[in-house]
Image (cartoon, rainbow, N blue to C red):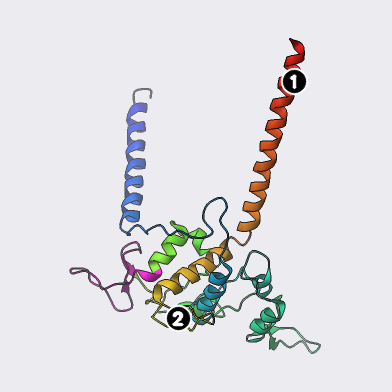
Amino acid sequence: MIGRTPTLLAAWLLLVGLAAQSTANAAGDAKHPQAVDWSFGGPFGTYDRSALRRGFQVYKEVCASCHGLNQIAFRNLAQPGGPEFSEAEVKAIAAEYEVTDGPDDYGDMFERPALPKDRLIEPYPNQKAARAANGGSYPPDLSLITKARSGGPDYIHALLTGYEDAPEGVEMRAGLYYNPYMPGGKIAMPAPLLEDLVEYGDGTSATVEQMSLDVTHFLNWTAEPELEARKKTGTMVLIYLTIFAGLLYFSMRRIWADQH
């Protein structure tokens, strides 16, 4: 048994190595996204309110036809650290949608205009309906997408702007599109952004690049709505610890000075 241990260990290490290599190869199929200088990056980063508002518009007018945001309620759009729409604006946005509510006094369900307390409306009633409408593919919920994908916001931005013609020798079946940032290079979602697809109220030019930056900015907020508060708290803690360390240092020097 003792003599067989090294052999078993070697076999186990070989299997682990092969599995790791397989994973690395799968990840290596995709083009690495270029880093973007996001305003929310770094220890003191904050969200750009204008970008968040524009990003919500892109989500609402483009992405929401297929993708939900089931972790976000309309009232979250008014909270500090986010797009910070006014209460009146949030009520107006919510009122554009209808939700199923009930039962009423007669036991029946009914439709009513959405309220700020309601979550953003899902585009499909269930997953089967979503797959049926998208050729068998399921459009993922975008609430946490920048956390769920390796590369985070850089990856989402690269994917949205990375569609191109398939290189020679790469066969694409019907319903698939070439995107080098997708593992395997094939994706079921057609390019969602086209030049001037939306009309920004602040006059910003709606290029594919700009819309991608804005909606990615917004989706990072949906994944980390507490980002600014967390960074502010962290900064205050560091300041407190620095002052405390300084007081402790000078107190210890005075104590030891008395000993001499």
Q: Where does residue 136 sit, x and y in percent of width and height? A: 41, 76
Q: Are marks 2 and 1 in contact (CB under 8 Å)?
A: no
Which corner quadrant of the image does residue 170 belong to?
bottom left
Residue plotted at (35% across, 55% down): 27
C-alpha distance separating marks 2 and 1: 76 Å
Q: Secondary structure beneath disc 1?
A: helix
Is 181 positioned to the left or the right of 43 in the image? left
| Residue at the farthest left position | 169
Is 201 positioned to the left or the right of 175 in the image? right
Residues packed near mark 1 inside 10 Å, few (<14), some (14 to 19) or many (20 plus): few
**Residue receiving disc 1:** 254
Image disc number at residue 243: none
- For the record, the magenta segment spans 160-186
**Residue receiving disc 2:** 132
Q: Where does residue 131 sit, x and y in percent of width and height? A: 46, 77
Q: Please tell me whether residue 215 is drawn above or below residue 103 in the rendered image.
A: above
Total marks placed: 2
Residue 106 or 81: which is nearer the viewer?
81
Q: Is residue 166 magenta?
A: yes
Residue plotted at (39% across, 67% down): 159
> Please, what is the three-letter code of the amino acid marked with disc 2?
Ala
Residue 257 or 33: which is nearer the viewer?
257
> Please, what is the three-letter code of the amino acid marked with disc 1?
Arg
Q: Please tell me whether residue 111 is drawn above or below residue 187 in the rendered image.
A: below
Q: Is residue 56 magenta?
A: no
Residues packed near mark 2 inside 10 Å, few (<14), some (14 to 19) or many (20 plus): few
Q: Please tell me whether residue 199 is drawn above or below residue 164 in the rendered image.
A: below
| Residue at the farthest right position | 105
Quarter holding the C terminus is: top right
Q: Please tell me whether residue 95 is drawn above or below residue 254 in the rendered image.
A: below
